[in-house]
Image (cartoon, helix red, strand yellow):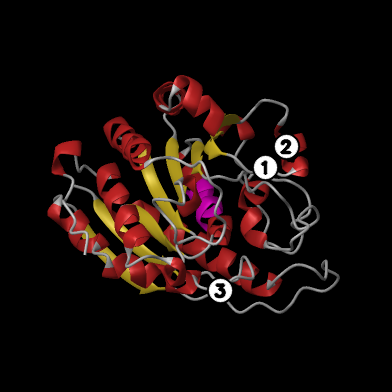
Amino acid sequence: MTHVILIGAPVDCGKRRRGCLMGPDAFRTAGLSDALAELGHQVSDLGNLAPQPVAPPLDSPSHLHALAENIGWCQTLRHAACDQAPQGLPIFLGGDHALSLGSVAGMADVAATLGRPLFVLWLDAHTDVHTPLTTTSGNLHGTPVGYITGRPGFDAFPPVPNPVPLSQIAMIGLRSVDPDERSFLTDGEALLVDMRTIDEIGIVRPLSEFLDRVAAANGLLHVSLDVDFLDPAVAPAVGTTVPGGATVREAHLVMEMLCDSGLVSSLDLVELNPFLDDRGRTANLMVDLTASLLGRRVFDRPTRSAV
């Protein structure tokens, strides 16, 4: 049995399209706590957190959206990770992907205190390795991997004393990568698995090889699951739709492999925008995937009414 700690992170400042504010409560309404409790886990819900108040930084690029609020959320969620990870398995209920600025940085600090490396599995259509200096949109939900790997340009944010090396990051499901991000990632250190690779060789081999590396290093594993990892045909409730994403079967396979590995120490559920959902379809799928990660087997998946 695992002590699962639900941390509501209604981050809605990482981009301009609103709606992710409602994400944490949509996960609750879709029955996340009950689904995990039925699997035998102890579940604690800390409710929804709030960003620390931060004065707007001076001399920052003017096109950055809600910079001070993003910094405040980074501080709040970093502290939450450090406080809660020793108590169990924290699940950060987003909220847009800017929440990972704090959740992953916090988990890197936790790993460092334990003398263990942190590995990150980024399940996303995007790499999110921009910085405040390279993002043309000014939307900071595209910067968390840049921040936690120590890219320059984050002077307004808290320092990252324990950056995660690219060699300890796997990105699976990629299909929309900007030129600057591609240039930064061409050194080959990060494991990059785009949808063509998955079409050609499947998802098992690259994920298995990455999990073997985590196990061999006695690492902690943080999983960051973006709704747009999934194909928008099955998960429409996201503002960054990119066709050709993972199928329901592929996503459940990933979650069950993660469960079998026993390596996952923390989880982000991000970019759920209930305003764009179809009768809770995406929220229900994300809950089902989380249940698969925490022990629900393929034979145990619920049958859902079509109406």
Name which residue type carries label 2: Arg
Which residue is denoted by mark 3 in the rendering? 18
User: Could you tell me if the residues under marks 1 and 3 are in contact, i.e. CB atoms within 8 Å?
Assistant: no
Which residue is denoted by mark 2 in the rendering? 182
Which residue is denoted by mark 1 in the rendering? 177
Name which residue type carries label 3: Arg
152 falls in the magenta region? no
Name which residue type carries label 1: Val
Which residue, as the protein is rendered here, is positioned at the far front?
307
Q: Which residues are magenta?
A: 103-110
Instruction: Report x, y in % for residue 122.
Output: 51, 42
244 over 45 or under it: above or below: above
| Left or right of residue 281: residue 213 | right
Residue nearer the viewer, 135 or 112: 135
Does residue 273 show up? yes
- Disc 1 is placed on an element classified as loop
Residue nearer the viewer, 238 or 293: 238
**Residue at the (20%, 37%) spot, across then down:** 298
